[in-house]
Image: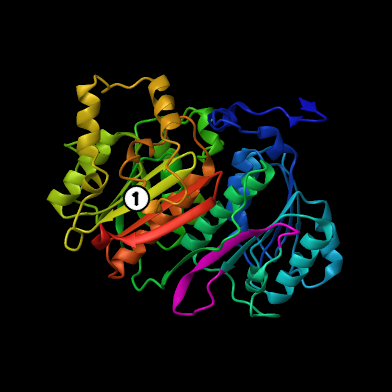
Amino acid sequence: MTDASRGPQPHIRHHRQQLIPGWRQEKLALAQVGIVGDGPYPASFFLAAASALGMRRFLIICPELHPAFVNVAQALEPTLEWVHLRGWLTHSAPAALLTTSSVLVDFSQLGLTNKILFNTARAHSIPLVTVRCTTDPSKSGFRFWSYTPGKESAIIQAMVSQRSLSAVDWQDAATAMAAAGLALEEVKRVLFGQPQTFAPVEYVRPNPRTSLENLRVAVVGAGALGNFAASTLTLCGCRYLTLFDPDRVDVTNLNRQIFFAHDIGSPKAPALAHRLNTLFGAHARGVAQSVDERTDLSPFDVVLDCVDNFETRRLLSLRAQQEGKILISGGTGPDKGQVVAFHPHRSRHTPAQLLDLDGILSKRQRNGQTARTREKRVQEKTMQRGPPSDTPLEKTFTASASCLVQADPSVVMSNQIIGAFMADVLRRMLSGEPSVLIFYESREPHGVRLVSVDDTNW
């Protein structure tokens, strides 16, 4: 059913995000997004996640898109209206097609394209979200920020790539996936009338020096974080994944668990393994069980903690410490997330120690909260909306770690961002870097913030 002023009525799959105060699903359904890029990453990642969010109308100018993520987008949103113009935006004539867009997203690394998009945005008063990958051949990463016509400043000069007529495709799947999630969060902020991210947000690290091809990885949790962490790892070359999850796919999962459009009612772990194998040529297997004290983790080099309960997260930290396993732990809320890494020979703390999970669980037990109700979870979310924006981001998470679980309400962006960073932190650790912690949040007063530190500072 369609209403002229409100667009298509929200699908039941959007229920989890509509629980967020001030959420405006109709703004997403009615918006048209113009996307410009140079290669299959990260425009395809943006398209798939935006379709899960409930966006329907896209005009894409890009030489090629990743077919697997196009298929994901079409499966998630059957009413998708999109046009893909194959090629580079190097003339103002095709840019005229973008003038009806609600917001523009620039993933291009071509200086000429950047100038055309900036002039189009300024001339037609269209907000512009800009994403640039790093130009240093020894590093990978990105910078991103927003531009609104009428707010010109010195930062505009940084919006134009130094490469005017040639560029290298963004080949790093992990940083491209994270950047796509940040861009989608910014687009949502623009459409909802929330403050934009005018100060550049940057993430840069040395190129990974280790192959993931023969790595054996256990992914504990095949939900939203598992979807993005496992697929990003696969795109980065990891082939051997074993997924653990006792749950089945529910329709309300589809606003963030992007690979399950055809798997309602199926066990999540085998369903995700099948998608990774058929879409990306992985050798994944799914185990429709949870991980407990009896689960054999000896075949695995690495464990990814993508679960939504503290008891399992604490258990995984303990077992990683006892059995000498690398552990990458991720947590998300509607507007924040964190990645905490543990290396048995180089890390000072486990994720459970850094986030004080023992203290959280002990307090909950003392208060008779071992089995929390849904109402209590929502109350905790509301109470922990966060400290003032001038607080250092990494200092906000020890006090509010208990909100970083995959519970109501939930959206795709934080899971896309944190899932991608989980894969990237693993590559950094395997390349010999210190154990890394990443903190992300997006709240109304100050836009998006992103901090990366190593655990020697904690």
For the N terminus, which image quadrant?
top right
Secondary structure of the residue carrying tag 1 is helix
Q: Is 429 positioned to the left or the right of 196 in the image?
A: left
Residue at 83%, 30% (x, y): give it.
4
Residue at 49%, 28% (x, y): give it.
250
Q: Is residue 417 visible?
A: yes
Residue 19: horizontal and vertical position, in percent?
A: 54, 28
Q: Is residue 142 magenta?
A: yes
Q: As shown in the figure, which amino acid type bears the numbered disc 1?
A: Lys
Q: Nearer the viewer, residue 312 or 195?
A: 195
Quadrant in which residue 431 is drawn: bottom left
Residue 237: horizontal and vertical position, in percent?
A: 42, 63
Q: Is 167 positioned to the left or the right of 452 in the image?
A: right
Residue at 48%, 51% (x, y): give it.
417
Q: Nearer the viewer, residue 331 or 426?
A: 331
Q: Is 5 positioned to the left or the right of 310 in the image?
A: right
Q: Is residue 108 magenta?
A: no
Q: Nearer the viewer, residue 124 or 110?
A: 124
For the C terminus, which image quadrant?
bottom left
Among all residues in the image, which is located at the extreme left?
Answer: 322
Q: Which residues are magenta?
A: 133-151
**Figure check: 439 above or below 444:** below
Residue 447: horizontal and vertical position, in percent?
A: 55, 50
Looking at the rendered structure, the number of numbered marks drawn on it comes to 1
Q: Is residue 283 visible?
A: no
Task: State the scheme by which the image is colored.
Answer: rainbow
Residue at 45%, 54% (x, y): give it.
420
Residue 85: horizontal and vertical position, in percent?
A: 77, 60
Estimate how packed mark 1 is, as few (under 14), some (14 to 19) or many (20 or more) residues with alpha carbons within 10 Å.
few
Q: Is 383 positioned to the left or the right of 179 in the image?
A: left
The residue wearing badge 1 is 395
